[in-house]
Every structure is written in structure tokens, then in C-alpha cells.
């Protein structure tokens, strides 16, 4: 993809000209209702699709904002829902409960992700089988797990996400696309030994991967609202403007590399 803004002007010129369409999409998995958010440029024709997986708070405005940012770059983006309709937390206790319910049964988590994958892959504005995924916090762990189990993703991008593997001990990941991890050196939730272990794991798997560690970043460094939330709940959360902009630009560069040059609609 060659439609690009500089890191310092991500939301200015293009928003004024792009014909961005957004839709709230309700879908079901095993009889349970989920709420997703689709964003795309209606004038752009078929484009690669990007799945956005939310933080542990649930499918909220932040995940939708990222989907719109991707649409402004010419992608068809779908912010999926891993918890279920209405399950959005405003307190860490609720967020932890929602997250634990999903991670306790990985087959359920995988099915929820794969349902969203199919929904995006079959959309009229998505190039078939040209799908990547990106996730934040809990969502970063989700996209890395889906990459490990061989989901046909062109790329999987994790921002301040869990790096620990949920595969059975001794099982080698089956990674089919590029992996990019962004993490903070001062994030107590993602200690250095996890970064080292992940690097070794990906190296041994022969994966196409990169890990970017920001020296001064803590958890949730991409979310402008993180600092206030961290202070409110006494958690190690804080926004880092440099890490946010740099990780976003690197992500766009990665998508340029893994996706084909778009054709004229």
C-alpha cells in the first residue's frame, strides 16, 4: 500500500478527502452476539483487510479509532469483539474477568477470532486472503497466538501485548506471515525475560519477525487515554507519543511490504 501520511500528520489532510464508510456490525458465534466495527474507503475498491483486536477493556472507541485510521490509509479494517455485545469494562476487575473468561478456553477464543477473520475476508471491499491483524494489550496476545497456530495472516502486530506462548510445551509455532512486536522496556507486565523468550521462540521457528523495545515506555503506550486511566486505578499505564507514532509508522511500512500493490478499482 502506498497511501501514506507522515507520522506527525496521521489525521489531518487525508481525513478531509477520504470517503470513509463506517458500520457497526452485529454477528454471532455459537449463538452469542458480538459487536464489530467496519471501516473502509468506499471509493478505494478491494483492499487488504486488517483485523483490530481490542485491549482488555473490551471493544471500545479506541479500537474503533484505530480501524478508522487504517481505513484512512486505504485498508478495509474490522475492529472485532472478543467478549460479546455490551461487555466493555471501566474498571480493571471487570476487564480482568472478561479477559480471563476468554483466555480460559483457547478454542473459544480462536473461534471468535476466526469468525471475524471470515467476515472481513468475505467482505466486498476486501481482497480475498490478504488479511493481517493487529492488537493492543490483551489483543496483542490474541493476534500472536493466532499467528502461532498457523492462521493465514500476512502479518500479526502486537502493541504492548502478552508475549507468552499458550501452545503445548515443546510445540513449535507454525507462523505463516510476518510478526512485529512493540513493547516497553519499563512495562512490568511484559518483563525482559518474556521478550528474550519470545525472541528465542520466533528464531527457533524460523519466523519473519522483529521486536521493537522502547526504552522509556510502560504499558498501553499507544493509547492517549492511558495516563489518566493509570492514575485513576494506580496502574503502570502511560501514553508515550514517540512510541505511539513510531510504532504506527513501522506498522504501515510492514503492511506496505507484505501486501501487494493495490490495483485501480
Image (spheres, grey):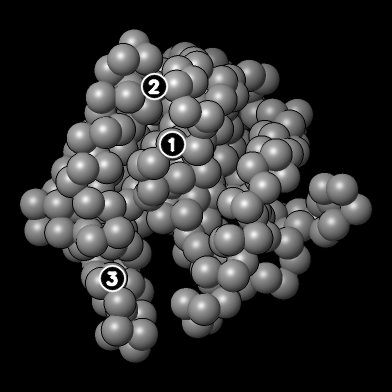
Q: How far apart are marks 2 and 3 (CA)?
A: 28 Å
Q: Which residue lies furthest to the bottom in this view?
A: 232
From the image, state whether disc 2 or disc 1 is nearer to you: 1
Q: Residue at 37%, 15% (x, y): give it.
A: 205
In the image: residue 99, left or right of residue 213: right
- Rendered-image quadrant of the N terminus: top left
Secondary structure found at label 2: strand
Residue marked by disc 2:
178
Q: Quadrant of residue 110?
A: top right
Mark 1: secondary structure: loop
Residue denoted by label 1: 165
Mark carried by residue 237: 3
Does the image show residue 134?
yes
Horizontal and vertical percent position of residue 128: 67, 20
229 displayed left or right of 57: left
Image point (47%, 54%), residue name:
138
Please tell me which residue lies in front, 5 or 18. 5
In this view, the residue in front, 139 or 106, is 106
Residue at the image position 57 percent from the left and 77 percent from the top: 94
Which numbered disc flags the more N-terminal residue, 2 or 1? 1
Where residue 58 appears, as percent x and y from the top left, is 57, 65
Amino acid at each position: 500500500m502506498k497511501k501514506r501520511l507522515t507520522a506527525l500528520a496521521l489525521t489531518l489532510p487525508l481525513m478531509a478527502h477520504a470517503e470513509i464508510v463506517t458500520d457497526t456490525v452485529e454477528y454471532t458465534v455459537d449463538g452469542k452476539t458480538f459487536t464489530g466495527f467496519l471501516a473502509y474507503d468506499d471509493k478505494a475498491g478491494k483492499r487488504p483487510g486488517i483485523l483490530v483486536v481490542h485491549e482488555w477493556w473490551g471493544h471500545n472507541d479506541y479500537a474503533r479509532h484505530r480501524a478508522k485510521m487504517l481505513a484512512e490509509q486505504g485498508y478495509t479494517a474490522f475492529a472485532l469483539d472478543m467478549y460479546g455485545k455490551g461487555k466493555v469494562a471501566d474498571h480493571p476487575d471487570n476487564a480482568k474477568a472478561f479477559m480471563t473468561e476468554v483466555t480460559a478456553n483457547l478454542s473459544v477464543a480462536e473461534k471468535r477470532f476466526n469468525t471475524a477473520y471470515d467476515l472481513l475476508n468475505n467482505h466486498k471491499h476486501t481482497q480475498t486472503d490478504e488479511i493481517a491483524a493487529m492488537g493492543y494489550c490483551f489483543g496483542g496476545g490474541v493476534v500472536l497466538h493466532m499467528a502461532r497456530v498457523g492462521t493465514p495472516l500476512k502479518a500479526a502486530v502486537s502493541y504492548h501485548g502478552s508475549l507468552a506462548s499458550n501452545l503445548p510445551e515443546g510445540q513449535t509455532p507454525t507462523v505463516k506471515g510476518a510478526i512485529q512486536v512493540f513493547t516497553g522496556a519499563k512495562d512490568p507486565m511484559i518483563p525482559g525475560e518474556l521478550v528474550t523468550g519470545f525472541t528465542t521462540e520466533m528464531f527457533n521457528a524460523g519466523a519473519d519477525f522483529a521486536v521493537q523495545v522502547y526504552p522509556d515506555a510502560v504499558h498501553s503506550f499507544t493509547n492517549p487515554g492511558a495516563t489518566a486511566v493509570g492514575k485513576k486505578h494506580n496502574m503502570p499505564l502511560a501514553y508515550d507519543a514517540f512510541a505511539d507514532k513510531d510504532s504506527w509508522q513501522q506498522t504501515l511500512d510492514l503492511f506496505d511490504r507484505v501486501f501487494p500493490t493495490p490495483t485501480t478499482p
